[in-house]
Image (tube, coloured by chain):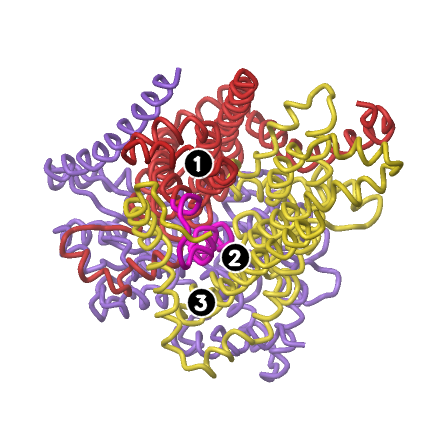
Chain colours: A yellow, B purple, C red
Amino acid sequence: MKRKNIIPGYGLTFGITLTILSLIVVIPLCSLVVFTSRLSLPEFLYTVSRPRVLSGYFVSISTAFIASAVNAVMGFILAWVLVRYDFPGKRFLDGIIELPFALPTAVAGISLTHLTTTNGWVGKFFYDLFGIKIAYTRLGITIALIFIGIPFVVRSVQPVLEKIDIQYEEAAMILGADSRMIFRKVIFPEILPSLISGFTLAFARCIGEYGSVVFIAGNTPYETEIAPLLIMSELQEFDYTAATSIALVMLAIAFVILSVNAVLQSVVSRRISGLA
Amino acid sequence: MKNKLISLVLAITLAASLSGCGSQSTEKVNAAESTIELTNVSYDPTRELYAAYNEAFKKHYKDEFGKDIEITQSHGGSGKQALEVANGLEADVVTLALEGDVQVVADAGLIDNGFTSEFDLDSSPYTSTIVFLVRKGNPKKIYDWSDLVRDDVGVITPNPKTSGGAMWNYLAAWYYFEEQGQSEAEILESIRKLYGNVVVLDSGARGATTSFVENKQGDVLLAWENEAFLSLKEYPGEYEIVVPSVSILCQPTVAVVDEVAKKHGTEDAAKEYLNYLYSDEAQEIEAQNFYRPSSKDVYSKYVFSAEGNTITEVPADGKWINDNITLTNIEHFGGWAKARADHFADGANFDQIYEQ
Amino acid sequence: MELRKNSGAIKWALILLCFVFLAVFLLLPLFYIVITALRDGISGYINAITDEYALKAVWLTVQATLWAVIINTIFGISAAWLLTKYSFRGKKILSTFIDLPVTVSPIIAGLIYVLTFGRQGVLYDYLDPLGIQIIFAVPGIVLATIFVTFPFISRELIPVLTAQGVDEEEAAALMGAGTFTIFRKVTLPHIKWALLYGVVLCTARAMGEFGAVSVLSGHLRGKTNTLPLYIELLYQGYDFTGAFASSSILVVMAVIVLILRLIIEKKGKKELDNKK
């Protein structure tokens, strides 16, 4: 596989990529590490493992996980519907998927909060009928995160689903497989890698989300206080090292999630090609 | 087709780079003319006040010194604003919610020490206090701090860790329970109960007001007096102000950011800007925006004439200041440095009340 | 074909589910924004969106977005080229770093620039004497916007370039074509639509960025307030009509961008069909 590459431009693209990457991402991230390194290791460990901080991670991670799980299911169904079916309004449906990207998170947060308080259009309904409060609870946070994460899964599954050749399914059907079996044995393995990568991206994005969540969360310590808000509140107390410590932990979490995704991708694709 | 697309992209690119240069050069032109530019970094609830004051000051400056002056405002949580100035946000003056926040800017080496004596009255030209805002008719019968620890009351107050106003709320409550003769452990228990009743702990004073007023959360909002009156004015007939028996004198602190003003050559203008806050004209503007003016003459003009501690509407004669209240101040808590260490630092009292 | 007919009931159930899901999570908040924006009538709406500060905020947002798109296009093309045309050590790490910004909390994204360029940062002492102000000024806002949209374009290009392989470029290189000729004549036609799609996504996300920009903007009215920040400012100033009216500007901008996306996709598909 290793051979001398004859396409020119290696030096040029390598240079541009590395320069911009360093300037925008790597150097600024390094200052995070530099600031945190002012703490000794025990101090650092103490700072990032205080009960309130732990509960912040927990709230962020658990709500993000549930939201991404909902999005994985709904995202898959959406992608399926958009690729496989024809129906009026399809283009419209397809067109609005990216809306959460374009709408400022603060605006999304504000309008979702207004809708889901016990006096809001949706919140009133749920509160009167079931006694469920949405805004200012973890449920509210989850709702905001579902909003944020919608495009991720749809847009990673959709292109893969489009490429699957319908012939495989037809062949499977001729061989006597029922539709559930076709789905399990033919379609699902094909789209699994993209489903995983969509899920992990949404998950990682949701853990760090701030703008939309801070309005709907209620911010009660140990209940609805998210990790990014803790960073803000440490900054407010002028405690830079504490803020950067928490930030560093969150960064590490993001990095781990991305790496797990990379590993899963290669495992899954190896298994698939092994099967084939 | 292809070429068209490419040229379109190129055109956009060019336009963008030009726009970047363009905006920079216009700033320079402004500086070259004799317009003085001041940046005032302030806290959340002063928007309306400084919008009005800046107009008056512009006129005053033109009359007095014959020069045009432009003032750029920035508003946000007081602590956050202080931090940003300390980090390099180029403010000529800061007008923050508490002395402790100005101290942060001073600690960064940007303000010379002794800023509290640079202007009259500890450098606070106007003051405020903490009052209760309740819904119309006061359905939950909330009259004093003791009512806030009742089980059936939902309280809205911002987080003292992220909001200057919220620190004043917390300290005022503390003072009340102290006045009731409670021991420190009992006070802590009362405060724990009070914060247990908090429905939404917003990150800033304005966020808390919005939760209470617009999203209809909770039964009582602990608010800056000026915020409470503003809500009364914006939503006539929907809310009432209850003035508790005791509260705290909130002294927002103003200061010239010496280093930045020196760099910009705006020291004199900045000083004049803050000094003029003490003039009768400015004191009137402050009183009209529901800040308690420091001038005794102006103050007495606005003292509330009616009886009782409940205010159902902005008085038609504009006299809104309720004098029937005992105010403590930050000195009672040993100054800001001590109050912060005792109550708001990591692991201090406020953190303890949330520990199970 | 038969496969699709089989599942009529399921098909419509799934389509209905998608419509309900998107209606509740995407359209309802949008609808709420529009209704609130018009609460004070048309004239109130027009006043709100033609306010001097609103226009300045729009202009700043447009500027930041354009810069982000330009830099990310340059970066995206060169990174995608680098990652797909050559094999070299550290490729996986490089690609993880490129993806990282999407998963970094916007708060942290803003924080790292404050730490790098703020008065506490290492670079401040060098930049300040030169009169260069990065954070609390337009360049910082541009940087933060680039950061949050960093991988958007390269992520769109990489799959296309991977699928295309390197044969055509190698052939062109053997015939003696230079880097730019190869790129323009061979590669660009293949990636044109993916590139435009990436640009659209980048634009959408850049317009709405709130968290990162909020940390380093300084909120100077008329100078460093982007549209999302301006909306928050109005919202907190009891000017709900104004806040939602300004939000609707962003909604309109977002809708335009999404319509562009649909057009691009349609054109791309048509061209693909023509080739076949």
- Residue underneath mark 1: C167
Q: CA distance from mark 3 to mark 1?
A: 50 Å
- Please state the extent of the stretch shown in magenta in the rendering: C82-109
In the rendered image, which quarter is residue C149 located in? top left
Q: Amino acid at mark 2?
A: Ser
> Which of the two residues, B349 or C15, is positioned nearer the viewer here?
C15
Q: Quadrant of the N terminus of chain B?
A: top left
Query: Would you say A21 lies left or right of C148 here?
Result: left
Same subunit, labels 2 and 3: the answer reads no
Res A57 → quadrant: bottom right
Would you say residue C95 sits in the magenta stretch?
yes
Q: Is residue B223 visible?
A: yes
- Residue A243: which disc? 3
Nearer mark to the viewer, of 3 and 1 = 1
Query: Where is residue C50 shown, x and y percent of the image?
Result: 40, 25
Q: Which chain is disc 1 placed on?
A: C
The residue drawn where x is 67% and y is 53% is B218
Residue at 22 percent of width and 64 percent of height: B110
Instruction: Tell me the quadrant of the picture where the C terminus of chain B can be found.
Output: bottom right
Pointer 3 indicates a residue of which chain? A
- The crowding category of the residue bearing disc 3, from other C-alpha atoms within 10 Å (few below 14, some 14 to 19, many at least 20), is many
Q: Position of residue A12 (x, y in %)?
A: 28, 45
Q: Is residue C46 magenta?
A: no
On whether disc 3 and disc 1 are found on a single subunit, the reply is no
Front position among marks 1 and 2: 1
Identify the element where label 2 is drawn.
loop
Q: Residue at x 35, y 61 (%)?
A: B83
Q: Is residue A165 above or below residue A265?
A: above
Q: Give the labeled residue for mark 2.
A: B203
The amino acid pointed to by label 1 is Asp
